Image (cartoon, grey):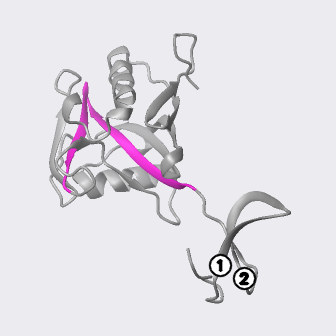
Amino acid sequence: MKFCSECGHRVEKRVAADDPIPRFRCTHCHYVHYQNPKILVSCYATWEDKVLWIRRGTEPFKGKWAAPSGFMEENETLVEAAARELYEETRARVDMDKMSLHMVGNLTQMNQVYIVFHAPLLSPEFATTPEAEEARLLTLDEFPFDDFAFPEVVENVSLFYRDIQNQHFNVYLGTLKNGVNQVIQNDDSHLHRL
């Protein structure tokens, strides 16, 4: 950031006495420009023991497999955002009343918070779009782990398939820091769930 969006003068990134975090501050009107994490949402849409995945049609990682996802817009809830992103990328619809939280991920290096839901598809109907050159319902055995766009979060994918098999869905907290994914569960197993 170089210029103030309030008055057009130059900004400087500095610490102020009332705030220990360096922030862009206007040198003229003294407006403080806060830069906060963006919220990235996704929905693991299911049909029986299968999950709907896409082969990305856009960069980054064009041609690799991923979950339909995107950024939350103004004036929408997390659930609405996840359902919208799923529909925009696959034309699939889920039962929003049955949408449940699966994971909250801290993507600290990217300054993002990743919220993953899961919900059953209303029907096994979906399509390709400019954002998804291919869309498929896949079981765990069919999942392309070697061709996944984000290998640092495959543990999350495995946990979700395990939850499908157990028919018991947990909520997880994860942090991706320095390329290493740390997942916390909410039970007394080797990981801790929320």
The stretch in magenta equals 37-57
Mark 1 lies on a secondary structure that is strand
Between 51 and 95, which is closer to the camera in this rendering? 51
Between 186 and 60, which is closer to the camera in this rendering? 60
Query: Can you give x and y, in whole percent of width and height, for residue 193 in the image?
Result: 55, 22
Is mark 2 in CB contact (under 8 Å) with mark 1?
yes
Identify whether 190 is placed above or below 62. above
Disc assigned to residue 62: none
Q: Is residue 85 left or right of residue 5?
A: left
Label 2: which residue?
27
Q: Is residue 67 left or right of residue 55?
A: right
Residue 186 in view of the camera = yes
Between 178 and 63, which is closer to the camera in this rendering? 178
Q: Residues within 10 Å of mark 1 (few under 14, many from 20)?
A: many
N-terminal-most mark, 2 or 1 = 1
Q: Is residue 168 left or right of residue 61?
A: right
Q: Is residue 3 left or right of residue 89?
A: right
Q: Is 45 included in the stretch rendered in magenta?
A: yes
Task: Tell me what residue is drawn at x 30 percent, y 42 percent.
Answer: 67
Q: Quadrant of residue 119?
A: top left
Task: Tell me what residue is drawn at x 20 percent, y 52 percent.
Answer: 62
Identify whether 4 is placed above or below 71. below
Q: Give how far apart the Cα atoms at labels 2 and 1 are.
A: 6 Å
The amino acid at mark 2 is Thr
Task: Tell me what residue is drawn at x 29 percent, y 54 percent.
Answer: 87
Label 1: which residue?
11
